[in-house]
């Protein structure tokens, strides 16, 4: 089988002999610690392996700093604490945050890789190696600190081995209602995660199953934690709210019932025995048919605090409670109904009621990972309760890895957005870092859904999103071009043609996908009735209970979400922001139909009508995709054949599918409104 994707961006391809000759011959690696489960030892072994592959050097491994200080050409890796304990001088090192690290090179070419903790040491080692793999020397005196403590992944893996919204084969974690025997891929996944400084993972689907907590599976979760721990990745689980009823046979799962409380206490104690460093619980409740506290007449806070209290008694895990609570049987005939309003309506009065180890996890937009959404207004309604943003690396609505879609440009529209809370600068990234409201724990989660396919995500190019997610969670101000180019050099090659072609395709990919899938804030016009969320189906985007609506009729299109005449959604933002969205004139074109219902003949700021914009954008988008495969063909011979062909196949498929998108959407709206394309393209097929 083709294994060309397993190492992802950690291929450590050898440098050319000329480039390699610029580097020191490292004689040894000194690890300040030799505990098998510690990321410090992992870091030392990774350094050995990387030097061997990138520079063809064989450095030996030792553990004693005392005998080696002042020796040239050594690499020291460990925590600041252990370094100073062993007599090293740390006086000049600036303060490090949890997981942060210090990299330095001395005049005699020795390297110091020192972490604030074990994990930081590992992150520093990866930084050193990923620079080296790009032919870049270790910097002098370089500090790197994370933007936020929580940088997690959510896997939507089911116990039977299937993955909800997974596009790369069965689970690497589960099969036949149990944890896999062979966890090799799980360790490899943790290695990729650690290299981009992701430190936690919820291993199972938010639509969880009570069998996860059977004695056999609790032990299995312990093995998963053991496989990931050496990489500094700790695990947590998603819980099924009704487990007391369905697993333990209790008559209720009411969060205030003493037997229910005792049940979760017992389970939590058992889980901590197997996973002493459990990061916590993720809860999807009262959402899309899942039971929850509301089922038992209790508040969302009472539901969350049930788990929070149990965790507190045994460890320092947190409850991550998802804000994705809404009615999925919403009636479209009422123009005031709006799913986008739901999260704020459910959570705004709860802010002071959650225990201090509860965090609210909020999807970036108020609906569901659409090609473009405004920032969820719930971020403006939490002050006391800290938040985690939820991104999606798995491209559920964005072409499911059969279309290329590099996501950082989309993420930046969210992270950089200034919510103007209390009239003060409030970019989303400053909320997530905890700075704005002095949160202790907050940060990032992304639904990733890797599978057992050797490409991890089903497509080599899609891996740039996993890599970038780690980079953005660490530093949300990262530059999207710099990030993709590091990834390209590590994954494929530093050859200028490779770098230019892949950068071009990646940077164009999201705007291009938006052009042919759903414009002007109308959402991804995909099939939501069959719930596959793939392929064009504009008709499916109305008359459904999900509340993902366009309100398209013969005359107009868009959701009126104004306070003045619509659903009132724009009023969920602070005044300065809501004033912008309340008025058509100040709403940016790319969110026009999200906030307003307008005639197809309405003139955009660009001067075009809405309908002509639809036609043109679909032609432009689909035309641009036609260039992707021919551009990629320039890489023939510059990268290995297996990955060259794998990507080429997908780009050709995407070229065809984009035409299907273009024509389905354009024909649909032509039929709705009867307004001809002024360039005469639509309707003549
Ligand atoms: C989306 C997705 C579901 C998922 C849900 C969630 O609606 O299509 O598969 O379960 O989000 O985030 O809980």
Image (cartoon, grey):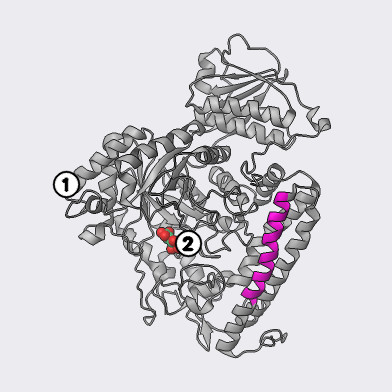
Q: Is residue 661 in view from this perspective?
A: yes
**Residues under labels 1 and 2: Cα distance?**
37 Å
Residue 639, percent from left and from top: 76, 47
- Numbered disc 1: secondary structure: helix
Determine whether 230 is above or below 318 in the image. above
- Numbered disc 2: secondary structure: loop
Q: Which mark is residue 591?
A: none
Query: Which residue, given by chain and number where applicable, does mark 1 sit on?
Result: 259
Magenta span: 642-662
The answer to whether residue 210 is left or right of residue 136 is left
Task: Sort mark 2 into few (<14), some (14-19) or many (20+) by Cα contacts within 10 Å.
Answer: many
Label total for image: 2
Q: Residue furthest right?
A: 18
Question: Is 122 within the magenta?
Answer: no
Question: Is 647 within the magenta?
Answer: yes
Residue 83, percent from left and from top: 54, 18
The answer to whether residue 196 is left or right of residue 259 is right
Query: Assess mark 2: CB under 8 A from ligand 1?
Result: no
Residue 289, percent from left and from top: 33, 64
Q: Nearer the viewer, residue 669 or 492?
A: 492
Residue 349, percent from left and from top: 30, 58
Q: Nearer the viewer, residue 499 or 421?
A: 499
- Name the main secondary structure of what is drawn in magenta: helix
Q: Residue furthest top?
A: 67
The answer to whether residue 683 is left or right of residue 429 is right
The residue sitting at 47% across, 71% down in the picture is 528
Q: Nearer the viewer, residue 164 or 284?
A: 164
Query: Which residue, given by chain and number where applicable, does mark 2 sit on?
Result: 365
Q: Is residue 425 in view from this perspective?
A: no
Task: Sort mark 1 into few (<14), some (14-19) or many (20+) by Cα contacts within 10 Å.
Answer: some
Determine whether 582 is above or below 125 in the image. below
């Amino acid at each position: 089988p083709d294994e060309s994707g397993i190492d992802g961006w950690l291929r450590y391809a050898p440098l050319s002999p000329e480039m390699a000759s610029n580097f020191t011959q490292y004689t040894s690696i000194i690890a300040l610690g030799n505990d098998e489960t510690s990321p410090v030892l992992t870091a030392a072994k990774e350094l050995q392996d990387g030097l061997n592959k990138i520079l063809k050097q064989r450095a030996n491994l030792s553990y004693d700093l005392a005998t080696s200080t002042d020796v040239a050409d050594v690499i020291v890796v460990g925590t600041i604490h252990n370094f100073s304990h062993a007599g090293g001088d740390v006086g000049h090192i600036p303060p490090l945050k949890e997981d942060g690290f210090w990299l330095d090179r001395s005049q005699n070419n020795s390297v110091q890789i020192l972490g604030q903790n074990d994990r930081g040491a590992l992150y520093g080692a990866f930084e050193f190696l990923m620079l080296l793999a790009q032919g870049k020397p270790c910097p002098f005196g370089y500090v790197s600190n994370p933007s936020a403590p929580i940088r997690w992944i959510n896997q939507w893996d089911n116990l039977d081995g299937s993955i909800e919204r997974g596009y790369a084969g069965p689970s690497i974690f589960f099969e036949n209602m149990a944890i896999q025997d062979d966890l090799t891929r799980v360790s490899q996944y943790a290695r990729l995660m650690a290299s981009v400084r992701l430190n936690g993972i919820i291993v199972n689907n938010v639509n969880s199953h009570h069998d996860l907590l059977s004695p056999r599976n609790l032990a299995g979760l312990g093995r998963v934690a053991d496989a990931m721990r050496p990489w500094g990745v700790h695990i947590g689980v998603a819980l099924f709210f009704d487990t007391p009823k369905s697993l333990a046979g209790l008559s209720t799962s009411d969060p205030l019932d003493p037997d229910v409380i005792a049940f979760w206490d017992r389970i939590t104690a058992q889980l901590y025995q197997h996973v002493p460093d459990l990061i916590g619980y993720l809860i999807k409740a009262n959402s899309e048919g899942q039971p929850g506290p509301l089922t038992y007449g209790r508040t969302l806070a009472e539901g969350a605090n049930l788990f929070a209290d149990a965790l507190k008694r045994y460890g320092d895990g947190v409850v991550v409670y998802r804000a994705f609570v809404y009615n999925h049987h919403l009636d479209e005939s009422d123009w005031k109904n709006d799913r986008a309003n739901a999260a704020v309506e459910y959570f705004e009065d709860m802010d002071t009621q959650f225990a201090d180890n509860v965090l609210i996890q909020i999807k970036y937009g108020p609906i569901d990972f659409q090609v473009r959404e405004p920032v969820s207004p719930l971020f403006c309604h939490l002050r006391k309760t800290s938040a985690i943003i939820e991104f999606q690396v798995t491209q559920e609505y964005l072409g499911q890895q059969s279309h290329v879609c590099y996501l950082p440009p989309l993420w930046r529209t969210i992270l950089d957005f200034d919510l103007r809370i209390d009239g003060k600068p409030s970019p989303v990234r400053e909320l997530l870092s905890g700075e704005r409201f002095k949160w202790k724990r907050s940060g990032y989660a992304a639904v990733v859904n890797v599978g057992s396919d050797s490409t991890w995500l089903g497509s080599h190019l899609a891996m740039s999103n996993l890599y970038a997610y780690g980079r953005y969670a660490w530093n949300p101000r990262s530059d999207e071009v710099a990030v993709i180019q590091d990834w390209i050099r590590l994954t494929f090659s530093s050859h200028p043609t490779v770098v230019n072609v892949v950068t071009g395709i990646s940077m164009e990919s999201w705007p291009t996908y938006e052009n042919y899938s759903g414009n002007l804030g109308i959402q991804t016009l995909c099939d939501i009735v069959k719930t596959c969320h793939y392929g064009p189906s504009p008709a499916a985007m109305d008359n459904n209970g999900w509340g993902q609506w366009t309100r398209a009729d013969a005359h107009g299109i868009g959701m009126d979400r104004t306070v003045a005449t619509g659903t009132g959604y724009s009023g969920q933002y602070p005044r300065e922001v809501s004033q912008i969205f309340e008025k058509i004139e100040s709403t940016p074109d790319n969110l026009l139909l999200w906030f307003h219902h307008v005639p197809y003949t309405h003139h955009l700021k660009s001067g075009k009508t809405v309908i002509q914009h639809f036609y043109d954008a679909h032609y432009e988008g689909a035309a641009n995709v036609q260039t992707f495969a021919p551009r990629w063909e320039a890489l023939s011979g510059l990268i290995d054949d297996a990955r060259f062909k794998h990507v080429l196949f997908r780009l050709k498929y995407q070229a065809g599918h984009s035409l299907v998108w273009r024509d389905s959407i354009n024909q649909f709206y032509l039929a709705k409104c009867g307004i001809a394309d002024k360039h005469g393209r639509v309707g003549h097929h």
